[in-house]
Every structure is written in structure tokens, then in C-alpha cells.
Image (cartoon, rainbow, N blue to C red):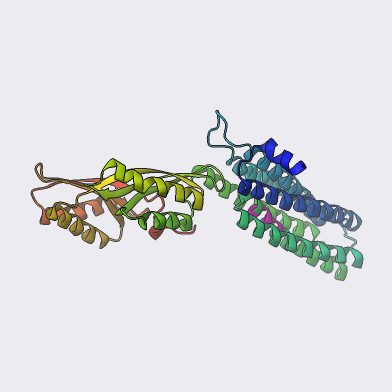
């Protein structure tokens, strides 16, 4: 009954969307419970042992709990669905919540970096016991298990918040491991005051994790390259459709995890009627929406199939352009024989150092073959082509 009420409250029309929401909430709640328990344990250990490193680690756990709470709130907002003011929905709120998480992590890291430096300047003895060491070992194991579980859930549900939380948990396990090592050293050599130095190291790990999350979110908000796998699958679906001669200029607009609107230009025979084009594109639109959750808009390029001379010109251009490294693709080929005019789009690799030089090279090749023709090239961008996609 409560589940149905929640569905109605959040206006989640599709069971798949509701399932994703529910699983992210469950994972986040588990994260909150584990982090609060670990935070309490570490506060006790840190207070008993007089260790700023352990206390900073404990506060980091409480910050993780707040992060999970932010994730839950963000999911509740993102699940509201489209409104008149926000017709694309609220999916991008997950990115903003990840930014909030990263800022919390950065604030936590900065505060305890300051405290650790103070303890280096004014060192104090620590007082670890075998019991406190066992509790730290338990905390490490719990964090590793939580990190692996959360990260796996995040990848499965395509949730940037969960992936970030999982990675943060694994980093926390390393941090606690360093703290445990410092505790062992303090037991063996009581006069060796390294707690402040370990606190600085812990703070550095925290700051690094927060900065990485922040940069990743900024990249997504700026509009980073969509998944190469998703783009390739959509292109394969399109190109396998009978009647489609080619597909170009695929762009996927992201409005949150699993929320895409796309557009692509199709090459169709110049003899095809509007009705015939509709018979091809409407079922294709439905298939892409069902299979990949992308609502696709189609534009068209007319391909001349009646004039053998124009067909030969197109094949000559494509063959020569393909041999030039910095050119990824040629499309939108058009020829007017009466006016001696040729035009096409050129997709350049983002790594191209001198686009003008490449254009002139291709222009010379065409002028040698077709000296009477005026050639117009339109530079195009590589939005989703996998040939130049690189992990950065």
C-alpha cells in the first residue's frame, strides 16, 4: 500500500523507472546505516586514543551519510516527471546532488587538514589498545563491502551518485587502513608522534575524492560525450533498417541518467516519397525508444541514385577522404551538374592540428579531378563517432 502511494506521489509512470528509484533508495539507506555505525565506532576509538586521524575519518563517515541522504532527496525530486516549466523532467538534479556531495567532501577534507597540521605543530601522544585496533579492522572490512556493493549497484542502475559513493567508500577503506597502520606504529613506538601526519594524508585522500567527483559532475553538466556503446547500438539499429542508406550527425542530448533525446540525419534515395520515408522512420523511432529509451528525431539527406556520374563522384570523394587521417567522415553530398557545384559536410577529428591544411588538401584532390566544379565544404563536429572517442 505504501509502495503504491509512493508511486502515485512521485508520478512515476513506468515500472522500470520506479524500480530504479526503489533500488537506489535501498542502496542509499544501507549506506546511511553503515556509515553512521562506523562513524560512531570511530568517534569512540578516536576519543579514547586521542587521535585526530581517526576522528577525521569518523566525520568523513558522517559526511558520507549526508551524501546518501542527498541522493535520496535528489531521487525523489528527479522522479517527479515532466512539468510545464520543466518539460524534460528533473533527471539532471542527480548531477547537482553529486556536486553537493563533492562540496561536502571537500569541506570535510579541508577542515581536518587544518586540524592535522595543528597536531603536527603541537603533537600529542595517542593511546591505542588492542580493542580499538580490532574495531578499525572491522571498519575497513565493512567499508570495502559497502563500496563494492554500492559501486556495483551504481553501474547497474546508471546512477552517478551511487558510483561516486561506492568509489568514496573504497577510498575510505584505504584511509582507515593507513590510520590502522599509524595506530600499530604508535603502539610499537609510543614516542613517535605520527598521528598529525597521518591526518594530513587522510585529508589529502578525502580532498582528492571530492575533487574527482566535482570535476566529473562539471563535465556532465557541460555536456560530455555520450556512451560510445549506446551511440554504436543506436547507429547499428538505424543502419540495419531497410531503406536507410546511411546515418550521420547523431547527437544525444542528456537530461539525466537514462534520459535522452536524440537527432540524426538519414540518407534516403532521392526517388523516395514522404509516405515511404514515414513508413521507414516511424517504426524505427518506436524501436529506439523501447530498446534504448531515446526519443529520436530524424532529418534527411537525399542520395542521388539515378545519375551514374554523380554516384561515381560521390564514391571518388569518399574513397579519397577516407585516406586522410584527420577526416572521420564525409556526408550530405550534393551535386548540381548544370551549375557545376559540389557540396558536402566534413567531420574532423578533434585532434586535428591544422583543419585548414586538411581542407586545402582535399580541395586540391577534387580540383585535379573536377577542375570545372566549385567545391563547398561545411566543417562538422564529431559528437558521437566512436573512431575518435577516447577515455580521458
Position of the N terminus, as image quadrant, is top right
Kindly give the residue lying farthest to the top in the view shown: 85
Based on the displayed image, in which of its 4 quarters is residue 386 positioned? bottom left
Does residue 119 appear anywhere in the picture?
Answer: no
- In the image, is 223 to the left or to the right of 127? left
| Foreground residue among 278 and 391 | 278
Residue 167 forms part of the magenta stretch = yes
| Foreground residue among 271 and 77 | 271
Residue 171 horizontal/vertical position (percent): 69, 59
Residue sitting at 58 percent across and 41 percent down? 91
From which residue to which does the magenta span run? 163-169
Residue 287 forms part of the magenta stretch = no
Residue 342 horizontal/vertical position (percent): 17, 47
Q: Main secondary structure of the magenta part?
A: helix
Residue 223 horizontal/vertical position (percent): 49, 45
- In the image, is 242 to the left or to the right of 18? left
Does residue 15 appear anywhere in the picture?
Answer: yes
Residue sitting at 57 percent across and 37 percent down? 89
For residue 142, above or below residue 340: below
Residue sitting at 20 percent across and 52 percent down? 360
For residue 253, above or below residue 313: above
Amino acid at each position: 500500500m505504501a509502495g503504491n502511494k509512493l508511486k502515485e506521489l512521485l508520478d512515476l509512470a513506468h515500472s522500470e523507472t520506479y524500480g530504479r528509484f526503489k533500488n537506489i533508495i535501498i542502496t542509499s539507506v544501507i549506506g546511511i546505516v553503515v556509515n553512521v555505525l562506523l562513524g560512531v565506532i570511530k568517534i569512540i576509538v578516536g576519543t579514547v586514543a586521542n587521535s585526530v586521524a581517526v576522528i577525521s575519518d569518523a566525520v568523513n563517515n558522517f559526511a558520507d551519510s549526508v551524501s546518501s541522504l542527498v541522493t535520496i532527496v535528489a531521487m525523489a525530486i528527479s522522479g517527479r516527471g515532466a512539468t510545464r516549466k520543466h518539460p524534460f523532467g528533473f533527471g539532471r538534479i542527480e548531477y547537482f546532488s553529486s556536486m553537493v556531495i563533492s562540496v561536502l567532501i571537500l569541506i570535510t577534507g579541508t577542515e581536518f587538514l587544518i586540524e592535522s597540521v595543528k597536531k603536527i605543530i603541537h603533537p600529542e601522544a595517542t593511546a591505542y589498545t588492542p580493542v580499538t585496533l580490532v574495531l578499525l579492522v572491522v571498519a575497513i572490512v565493512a567499508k570495502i563491502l559497502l563500496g563494492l556493493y554500492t559501486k556495483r549497484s551504481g553501474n547497474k542502475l546508471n546512477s552517478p551518485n551511487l558510483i561516486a559513493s561506492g568509489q568514496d567508500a573504497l577510498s575510505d577503506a584505504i584511509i582507515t587502513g593507513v590510520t590502522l597502520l599509524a595506530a600499530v606504529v604508535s603502539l610499537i613506538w609510543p614516542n613517535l608522534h605520527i598521528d598529525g601526519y597521518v591526518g594530513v594524508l587522510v585529508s589529502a585522500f578525502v580532498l582528492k575524492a571530492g575533487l574527482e567527483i566535482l570535476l566529473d559532475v562539471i563535465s556532465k553538466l557541460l555536456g560530455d560525450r555520450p556512451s560510445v556503446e549506446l551511440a554504436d547500438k543506436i547507429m547499428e539499429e538505424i543502419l540495419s533498417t531497410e531503406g536507410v542508406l546511411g546515418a550521420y550527425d547523431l547527437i544525444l542530448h542528456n537530461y539525466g541518467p537514462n534520459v535522452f533525446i536524440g537527432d540524426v540525419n538519414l540518407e534516403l534515395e532521392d526517388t523516395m516519397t514522404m509516405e515511404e520515408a514515414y513508413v521507414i522512420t516511424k517504426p524505427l523511432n518506436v524501436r529506439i525508444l523501447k530498446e534504448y529509451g531515446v526519443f529520436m528525431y530524424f532529418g534527411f539527406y537525399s542520395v542521388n541514385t539515378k545519375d551514374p556520374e554523380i554516384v561515381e563522384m560521390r564514391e571518388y570523394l569518399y574513397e579519397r577522404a577516407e585516406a586522410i587521417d584527420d577526416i572521420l567522415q564525409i556526408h550530405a553530398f550534393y551535386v548540381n551538374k548544370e551549375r557545376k557545384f559540389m557540396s558536402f559536410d566534413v567531420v574532423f577529428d578533434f585532434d586535428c592540428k591544422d583543419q585548414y591544411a586538411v581542407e586545402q588538401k582535399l580541395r586540391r584532390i577534387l580540383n585535379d579531378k573536377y577542375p570545372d566544379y566549385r567545391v563547398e565544404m561545411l566543417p562538422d563536429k564529431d559528437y558521437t563517432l566512436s573512431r575518435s572517442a577516447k577515455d580521458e
